Image (cartoon, grey):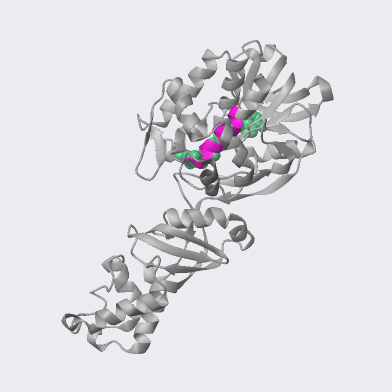
Amino acid sequence: MSKLTQTNWDVIIVGGGPAGFFAGIRCAELNPDLNVLIIEKAQQTLGKVLISGGGRCNVTHACFDPAQLIAFYPRGGAALRGAFTRFQPADTIEWFEKHGVRLKTESDGRMFPVTDSSTTIAECLRESAKRAGVPVQTGTSLQKVESLSENGFRLEVRSEAKVFHLQTKKLLLATGSDSKTREIVQSLGHTIEEPVPSLFTFNVNDKRIEGLAGVAIEYVTLKMDSLTQRGPLLITHWGLSGPAVLKLSAWGARILFDKKYRSRLTVNWLGDYNFDSALEVLQRNKDWRENARKKITAHPAVSQIPVRLWKQLTQFIGDKNWGDISKAEMRKLAEELTAGQFEISGRGQFKEEFVTCGGVCLDEVDFKTMRSRVVENLFFAGEVLDIDGITGGFNFQSSWTTGWLAGSAIGN
Ligand SMILES: Cc1cc2nc3c(=O)[nH]c(=O)nc-3n(C[C@H](O)[C@H](O)[C@H](O)COP(=O)(O)OP(=O)(O)OC[C@H]3O[C@@H](n4cnc5c(N)ncnc54)[C@H](O)[C@@H]3O)c2cc1C
């Protein structure tokens, strides 16, 4: 595209991701007289949207109360509280509906396009930008920014090994977790919270879960340091995954980073049971006459633990029948079931979603407008900010919200 022949713009948006597109479309729809350009360093825009949600794009979450919504953000929740009163999942649904895409809700609250295809979302954003008259320059990366105070900014950009200069009155950085841009943001005087990965699985090498890849447990409680998370758990070839693990990885992202992804993990396989209530269940099982001659390892005392897992958790008891279990063994088993000790030995990849926590320090941004409090006419939206959510559509929602707010402020 030859748009770079035009060097002066009212608005330049750096980053052709969901936040950049949402901001660009919003500001051009509000104020068609503005000339707005999106630059994107990759050859195609919306790369993460296309691979998101296993190719289905988990656009948002059916949670419509801002106060409840912010609880899904390990970082950035407080700042988003007011922002969600202005643009929240209900507005996202309406926005996509107005732009020709219907969303549907799954039983766990996650929302997807009815087509179950992330291409629908990417195409909608590209088409809407086109219709709003927002050109998108791909293969073009921001290299440097010079602030010209009231005259805006002079940008150095690189495209096909050539360096150009562009000038803009307003600049929006929606560059996601790109490290180069973080340096540029720092050079402008902003503070960056150190970026670390969030939403990952745990590598756990332990005999008790060996060979059980694919076994799922509906509801467990996990504890690590002072953190507790509950939910479904999945045993994988490398360790542990599933919603409970992903939530713990998000809330514990910085702790685990500092510990080099090595930490003690306590697993309560019985969710809300404690040691005493588990012991009671085991005692009842032992007292049941019909059980007396049944092998402990083959006959779980509780239905929530799959037989294959139960067998490995009770291995230490050997070949005994329920009638022969000793008090000490029963206490040890209750402990194993409600406070099993495991060692996290590394970080695994969760292929459906991945985000980075850290980014532009939130105190330095006005969340009514997404305007920088440090540099005039500079705006931020999306993952470039120190905001991240747990899995479930919350990360895109913060990009839609902050993108929309920035676009509204720029366009007004
Ligand atoms: C595999 C995967 C699956 C995911 N699935 C989901 C999901 O289903 N639901 C959900 O809510 N979240 C999901 N996420 C998280 C979500 O993708 C991000 O939170 C979201 O994309 C952030 O949007 P953004 O616009 O801020 O940044 P990005 O999507 O990262 O877009 C930033 C853009 O800026 C460009 N850029 C960076 N630096 C420059 C530069 N210097 N010059 C020009 N361009 C630049 C980048 O190339 C990129 O295209 C997923 C993430 C991954 C990795």
Residue extending farthest left: 290
Q: Residue at x 72, y 22 (%)?
A: 170
Q: Quadrant of the N terminus?
A: top right
Give whichever of 297, 368 is nearer the camera.
368
**What kind of secondary structure does the magenta stretch mostly adopt?**
helix
**Residue 194 at x, y = what percent?**
68, 49
**Residue 243 at x, y = what percent?**
43, 53
As for residue 403 lying within the magenta part, the answer is yes
Q: Residue at x 39, y 65 (%)?
A: 271
Q: Residue at x 57, y 16 (%)?
A: 29
Q: Residue at x 71, y 16 (%)?
A: 10
Residue 260 appears in which quarter of the rendering?
bottom right
**Residue 303 at x, y = what percent?**
27, 67
Give whichever of 124, 33 is nearer the camera.
33
Write down the region rendered in magenta: 393-404
User: In the rendered picture of this protein, how many numbered marks are placed on residues?
Assistant: 0
Residue extending farthest right: 149
The answer to whether residue 160 is seen in the rendering is: no
Q: Is residue 363 above or below residue 403?
A: below
Q: Seen in the image, is 370 located left or right of residue 349? A: right
Q: Quadrant of the C terminus?
A: top right
Q: Seen in the image, is 156 located left or right of residue 275? A: right
Q: Is residue 235 above or below residue 199?
A: below
Residue 154 appears in which quarter of the rendering?
top right
The answer to whether residue 28 is seen in the rendering is: yes
Please tell me in which quarter of the rendered image ligand 1 is found.
top right
Residue 332 appears in which quarter of the rendering?
bottom left
Q: Is residue 221 above or below residue 172?
A: below
